[in-house]
Image (spheres, rainbow, N blue to C red):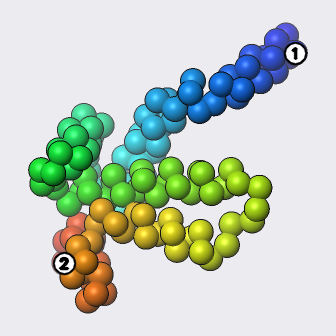
Amino acid sequence: MISEAETGISGLNAGWPGYLAPLARLLLRTESIASSKVEGLQIDARSLARAEVKQETGRPIGAQAIEVLGSIDAMELAIERAADTRAIDTTDLCDIHRVFMRRCLTPADENNGALPYARRQARQ
């Protein structure tokens, strides 16, 4: 029974990322929604999916969706970097943070050292 499970897992891993890519994005989305609630950000999966489509087509979306989508993007990069055989270094961490902030700040905000909109609202 254990060898059957090992064979199944090996077969699944051999097909990665093709087999599991849709599931991975869904799991990252779910985790990001859940962990964002800890930070006071409230958005459900359907609203987040709609916001992602809106943003990809150039339409405006809410600040909370922006931050959660940034979190998903950053997690995808973190997983990609962690899968590499070399050790994660400060460059990787800065890249991951930059990916997160990319959706959250405008270039003017970045130049002024501003916090993302949703975080500013939470602190007020």
Q: As drawn, is 110 to the left or to the right of 62?
A: right
In front of the other: 73 or 44: 73
The location of residue 38, given as percent across then percent down, is 39, 57
In the image, what residue type sits under mark 1?
A: Ser
Residue 64 location in percent, x, y?
24, 57
Quarter placement of the N terminus = top right
Instruction: Return the x and y of residue 124 as percentages of the image width and height.
Output: 19, 78
- Rendered image: mark on residue 124: 2
Marks 2 and 1, how far apart at CA: 56 Å
Query: Do the residues bearing badges 2 and 1 touch, measured as CB atoms within 8 Å?
Result: no
Ranked by sequence position, the earlier of labels 2 and 1 is 1
**Residue visible at 21% across and 82% down in the picture:** 108
Q: Residue at x 72, y 26 (%)?
A: 14
Q: Which mark is residue 91?
A: none
> Residue 90 occupies which quadrant of the picture?
bottom right
Amino acid type of the residue tagged 2 in the rendering: Gln
